[in-house]
Image (cartoon, rainbow, N blue to C red):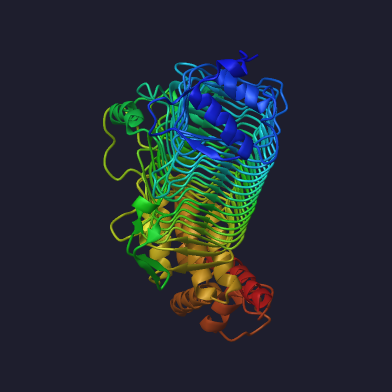
């Protein structure tokens, strides 16, 4: 309660104030020597404690006064407008539980403002240099107009600067260029219009600068920059569970935890996350866009777990994390040791975005004939120092990190398991120092990694290298483009990935081309495409830059396969067992003998499957000659694996009947042995078997009768074979059966194909 001052105790200045109040006139004491007004006098005027002062158009308009005692109207109903300008209050102002018509205190200096549960029927204006040296308390207050705090300076003196828990404002909160030293608390507040924090400076080093858990803003949340400066928070910001009916704009904002910015949120072994964030916005709901772009800088972790964004998530031009976090990671990468605690720049696990995610840089170059010309402007793209987490994230539209810089040596710098993108995921010209992990991800259209540069991949506990790009068990609706200068030092894992159309690695560089340093071991696989499925698979690499490691195509299934010499020169070989394709093409085109040489190089141990598949593809394409060459090579490799007897038998089959794939060769050998038999019997006439018959001696007919099975020409039964001729005739009969049956089998095979 206020201290009552009787009419007879009033000073001349106070009596003049009473007369001005009654008339509703302004009293300006700025140039007076006596500017003092007791707070009890103000309270008495406002509560009709002086007879005859509350008539007509009464209102309090006071400028430049010094209020010596506390002005306390706690719990009172004030029927008059209070308008005070550049007044200095030596003690606090008390309006708790009061009902006010309107209150304006522009440029006033107070020692605290106690307004718990106050109701203001119009605007509450604490603006234009309003300064409070203790906290302003509007807990549970109701403002049925606009709350204006433009240019206000709130200093809690080591305590909260502004208490607004469960504050209700029908209109907007205008706090442009406000300065707050201490916590600003808006937990559970409800703002009917926009919340303008443009150019605001919040300072509570090492502690909470803005507590907005459960905050509801029906309009826009503006924490951006303007001509008056950028929004800056020195301390943590909490917006967990907040609900923004419009857009949430942090364009150009600066967020830092102060006190040297203690550490980041870190992921420990087994996936545990230890939080230390500058913006904690888990479960934030924004009906419009969330803009963390255009110079937005957070020198700590930004948390958006479980957030729901109805519009777009804008991250272009943002910088998240601190360069200092990277030093121990770079040292671990250079030494070849795994990292136990992973610093996190952005954690957005489970986020839902109704529009697009934009984190790309502005294009400097252009696209010509499908190839990127020029570079991304990385200053306009996302820069992240530490891990970016998008586990279980869902983006209804497309996402672009083209030209972004993700820096996290020896860790998964992009951790996006089970990420779902409705449209295209652009990673063009992405620069990632660390691995990109997207296991079980789903991309509705194209995953475009053209020109991406992925270096310093994650290290395992045994100091071996993980893949630079891990797409295991992912689904891509259209194309997978890892081409036009794409580089993955740790290789690519596309195991069991389903690609709707084209998977291309044209001109890509895979694997660690230089020998690994320190204790690191090279990833044995430059490309793991086990079980991959696609309409077309293109594996053509730059000349002289074969994959540095193995290429695994086991059980991959494609319709069209395009390769080149550099693929088959991979340092770790190429595994093609059970690799199925319906068409094959080399760029540039090569002879089948060259392709068979490639297969011999990468398969020192014979396996029939790759040869059978290649022959079947040629045969289905109507190229019987190439198919025959492949089958001949298959039989050569097969018999070469056997012992001496088997190799001899294989040699005989190849040169006599072409393993049954050259039936015409059997006819040639029949002719050769027919000539041999004819010549033999010309010099060795046989004796008649039956003296009662008188057959004519004909060496050509006899030789032919011996060689041709089934058909009886009547010659071999007319003569008695003796001596060496008996053995010669037996050999000719055996050779005839073998060669004739081989020729018949070959002819049958040809007829069946036709």
Find residue 570 and report its horizontal and vertical position in percent. Answer: 37, 50
Quadrant location of the N terminus in the rendered image: top right
Query: Residue at left 45%, top 55%?
Result: 449
Q: Quadrant of residue 140?
A: top right
> In this picture, is 366 found above or below 423?
below
Q: Is residue 692 visible?
A: yes
Work out whether residue 20 or residue 363 is closer to the camera in this orientation and state it. Answer: 20
Work out whether residue 57 or residue 330 is closer to the camera in this orientation and state it. Answer: 57
Find residue 754 and report its horizontal and vertical position in percent. Answer: 65, 79
Q: Quadrant of residue 432?
A: top left
Query: Residue at left 36%, top 33%?
Result: 322
Q: Is residue 381 left or right of residue 45?
A: left
> In this picture, is 418 found above or below 205?
below
Q: Is residue 512 left or right of residue 658?
A: left
Find residue 479 and report its horizontal and vertical position in percent. Answer: 55, 61
Find residue 491 and report its horizontal and vertical position in percent. Answer: 41, 45
Query: Residue at left 32%, top 28%?
Result: 336
């Amino acid at each position: 309660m206020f201290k009552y001052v009787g009419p007879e105790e009033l000073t001349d200045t106070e009596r003049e104030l009473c007369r001005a109040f009654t008339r509703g006139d302004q009293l300006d004491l700025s140039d007076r020597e006596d500017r003092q007004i007791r707070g009890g006098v103000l309270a008495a005027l406002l509560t009709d404690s002086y007879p005859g002062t509350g008539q007509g158009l009464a209102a309090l308009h006071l400028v430049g006064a010094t209020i010596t005692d506390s002005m306390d109207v706690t719990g009172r109903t004030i029927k008059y407008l209070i308008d005070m300008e550049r007044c200095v209050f030596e003690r606090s102002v008390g309006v708790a539980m009061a009902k006010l018509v309107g209150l304006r205190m522009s440029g006033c200096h107070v020692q605290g403002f106690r307004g718990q549960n106050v109701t203001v029927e119009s605007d509450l204006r604490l603006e234009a240099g309003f300064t409070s040296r203790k906290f302003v308390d509007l807990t549970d207050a109701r403002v049925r107009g606009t709350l204006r705090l433009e240019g206000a300076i709130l200093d809690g003196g080591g305590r909260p600067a502004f208490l607004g828990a469960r504050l209700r404002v029908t209109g907007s909160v205008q706090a442009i260029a406000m300065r707050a030293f201490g916590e600003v608390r808006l937990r559970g507040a409800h703002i009917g219009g926009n919340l303008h924090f443009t150019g605001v400076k919040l300072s509570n080093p090492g502690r909470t600068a803005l507590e907005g858990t459960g905050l509801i803003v029906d309009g826009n949340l503006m924490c951006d920059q303007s001509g008056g400066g950028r929004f800056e928070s020195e301390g943590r910001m909490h917006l967990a569970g907040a609900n923004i009916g419009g857009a949430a704009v942090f364009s150009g904002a600066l967020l830092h935890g102060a006190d040297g910015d203690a550490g980041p949120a870190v992921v420990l072994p087994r996936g545990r996350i230890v939080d230390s964030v500058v913006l904690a916005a888990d479960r934030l709901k924004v009906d419009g866009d969330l803009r963390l772009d255009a110079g937005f800088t957070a020198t700590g972790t930004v948390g958006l777990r479980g957030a729901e964004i109805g519009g777009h998530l804008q991250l272009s031009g943002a910088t998240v994390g601190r360069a200092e976090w990277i030093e121990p990671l770079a040292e671990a990468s250079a030494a070849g040791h795994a990292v136990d605690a992973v610093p996190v720049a952005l954690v957005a696990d489970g986020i839902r975005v109704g529009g697009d995610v934009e984190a790309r840089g502005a294009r400097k170059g252009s696209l010509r004939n499908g190839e990127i010309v020029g570079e991304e402007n990385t200053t306009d793209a996302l820069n992240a120092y530490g891990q970016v987490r998008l586990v279980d994230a869902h983006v209804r539209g497309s996402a672009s990190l083209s030209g972004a810089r993700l820096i996290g040596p020896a860790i998964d710098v992009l951790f996006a398991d089970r990420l779902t993108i409705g449209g295209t995921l652009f990673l063009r010209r992405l620069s990632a120092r660390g691995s990109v992990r997207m296991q079980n991800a789903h991309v509705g259209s194209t995953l475009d990694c053209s020109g991406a540069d992925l270096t310093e991949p994650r290290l395992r506990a045994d100091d071996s290298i993980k893949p630079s790009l891990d797409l295991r068990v992912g689904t891509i609706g259209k194309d997978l483009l890892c081409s036009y200068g794409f580089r993955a030092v740790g290789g690519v894992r596309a195991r069991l990935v389903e690609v709707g159309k084209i998977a291309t690695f044209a001109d890509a560089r895979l694997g660690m081309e230089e020998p690994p340093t320190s204790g690191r071991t090279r990833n044995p696989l430059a490309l793991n495409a086990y079980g991959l499925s696609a309409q077309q698979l293109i594996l053509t690499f730059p000349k002289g830059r074969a994959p540095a490691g193995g290429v695994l195509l086991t059980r991959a299934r494609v319709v069209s396969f395009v390769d080149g010499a550099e693929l088959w020169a991979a340092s770790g070989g190429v595994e093609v067992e059970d690799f199925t394709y319906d068409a094959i093409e080399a760029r540039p085109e090569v002879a089948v003998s060259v392709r068979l040489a490639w297969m011999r190089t990468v398969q020192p141990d014979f396996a029939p499957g790759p040869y059978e598949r290649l022959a079947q593809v040629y045969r289905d394409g109507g190229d019987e000659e190439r198919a025959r060459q492949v089958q001949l090579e298959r039989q050569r490799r097969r018999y070469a694996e056997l012992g001496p007897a088997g190799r001899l038998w294989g040699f005989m089959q190849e040169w006599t009947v072409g393993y049954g794939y050259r039936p015409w060769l059997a006819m040639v050998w029949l002719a050769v042995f027919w000539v041999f038999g004819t010549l033999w019997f010309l010099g060795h006439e046989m004796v008649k078997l039956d003296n009662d018959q008188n057959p004519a001696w004909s060496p050509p007919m006899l030789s032919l009768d011996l060689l041709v099975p089934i058909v009886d020409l009547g010659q071999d039964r007319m003569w008695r074979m003796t001596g060496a001729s008996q053995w010669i005739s037996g050999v000719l009969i055996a050779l005839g059966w073998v060669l004739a049956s081989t020729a018949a089998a070959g002819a049958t095979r040809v007829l069946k194909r036709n």
